[in-house]
Image: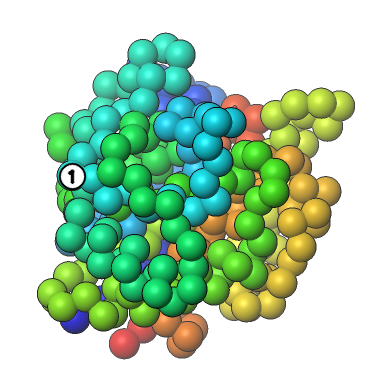
């Protein structure tokens, strides 16, 4: 039986990828951001999973307004970094896990959640920046990654409640997989940010810190928050935070151990947050 040992939560700001790729990590603006992830990288090196199930959002790279899947699971053998306008990021291609991904699709769909099955797609900063933050700049990513894309870009978006319940279905699916794999579920995007309009640049530190507190201690209560509250309090792109509830829903019902928590403002137009939660046996 496969097991979920831990979950990781992190923002995905594209400028962080650019700072890494251009070697700007030591600049005064970026230094505190990367310093906040030193412990995360050390933790990951010590708690290397067999597979990462990575919940993220695509930003019109793999999908356009032609097709808008609410939840899409990557069942392919590999996924190339997307070209988002400046050429693909110089990072390793992502190696998938088709057998586990297909099993999760089968189990979660039979558990009444509709997924779009994607055998071929490129992955954008939503997926590659979290990998870079957690792994640095390796020649190959440390393990296979199953991309799980959530639509938080084009309305209507899924509710936090549905995301949390979906996380539980993903947990059931992983625990039914007949191989002793150690799996981590990552929830990415956020924290508060708004990229356009009169409120562009909005950061709500109180909202973000409360979100982190509640994600740890009261995820089921937090999952009841309506999407309009994310948008009002955390900005239009703050809605990316519903993806963290999928990863949290995949964790055990017992209170988790907090291995690391980090929050910093600013990183480009966003507040950057990160959390590592371990399942307690
Ligand atoms: C920024 C943040 C995002 O989440 C994104 O997808 C694009 C840009 C930013 O802060 O610049
Ligand atoms: Fe984004």
In terms of secondary structure, where does tag 1 sit? loop
Number of residues whose C-alpha sits closer than 10 Å to that of mark 1, classed few (under 14), some (14–19) or many (20 or more)? some
Q: Nearer the viewer, residue 281 or 198?
A: 198
Q: Is residue 175 left or right of residue 62?
A: left
Give the residue number, with chain letter if any, for mark 1: 77
Residue at position x 73%, y 40% in the image: 236
Number of marks? 1
Residue at position x 72%, y 35% in the image: 194
Q: Is residue 117 left or right of residue 65?
A: left
In the rendered image of this protein, does residue 277 appear above or below residue 52?
A: below
The answer to whether residue 160 is visible is: yes
The answer to whether residue 49 is visible is: no
The quadrant in which residue 197 appears is top right
Q: Is residue 213 left or right of residue 109?
A: right
Q: Quadrant of the C terminus?
A: bottom left
The quadrant in which residue 115 appears is bottom left
Q: Nearer the viewer, residue 191 or 227?
A: 227
Residue at position x 56%, y 70% in the image: 164
In the rendered image of this protein, does residue 153 appear above or below residue 256?
A: above
The quadrant in which residue 133 appears is top left
Q: Is residue 32 left or right of residue 159?
A: left
x, y percentage for residue 233?
Answer: 80, 50
Q: Residue furthest right?
A: 198
Q: Residue furthest top?
A: 86
Q: Nearer the viewer, residue 243 or 64?
A: 64
Colour theme: rainbow
x, y percentage for residue 46?
Answer: 21, 61
x, y percentage for residue 237?
Answer: 67, 40
């Amino acid at each position: 039986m496969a097991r979920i040992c831990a979950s990781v939560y992190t923002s995905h700001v594209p400028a962080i990828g650019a700072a890494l790729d251009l070697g700007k990590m030591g600049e005064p603006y970026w230094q505190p951001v990367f310093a906040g992830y030193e412990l995360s990288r050390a933790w990951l090196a010590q708690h290397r999973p067999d597979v990462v199930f990575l919940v993220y959002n695509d930003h019109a790279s793999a999908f356009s307004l032609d097709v808008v899947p609410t939840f899409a699971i990557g069942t392919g053998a590999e996924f190339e970094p997307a070209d988002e306008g400046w050429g693909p990021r110089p990072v390793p291609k992502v190696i998938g896990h088709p057998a586990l991904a297909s099993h999760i699709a089968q189990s979660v769909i039979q558990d009444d959640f509709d997924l779009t099955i994607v055998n071929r797609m490129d992955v954008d900063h939503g997926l590659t920046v979290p990998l870079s933050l957690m792994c640095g700049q390796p020649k190959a990513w440390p393990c296979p990654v199953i991309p799980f894309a959530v639509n938080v870009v084009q309305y209507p978006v899924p509710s936090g409640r549905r995301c949390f319940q979906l996380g539980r279905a993903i947990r059931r699916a992983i625990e039914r997989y007949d191989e002793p794999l150690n799996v981590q579920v990552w929830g990415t995007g956020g924290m508060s940010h708004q990229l356009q309009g009169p409120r562009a640049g909005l950061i709500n530190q109180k909202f973000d810190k409360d979100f982190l507190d509640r994600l740890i201690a009261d995820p089921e209560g937090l999952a009841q928050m309506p999407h309009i509250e994310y948008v009002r309090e955390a900005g239009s792109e703050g809605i990316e935070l519903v993806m963290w509830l999928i990863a949290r829903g995949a964790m055990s019902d017992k209170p988790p151990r907090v291995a690391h928590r980090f929050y910093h403002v600013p990183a480009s137009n966003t507040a950057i947050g990160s959390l590592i939660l371990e399942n307690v046996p």
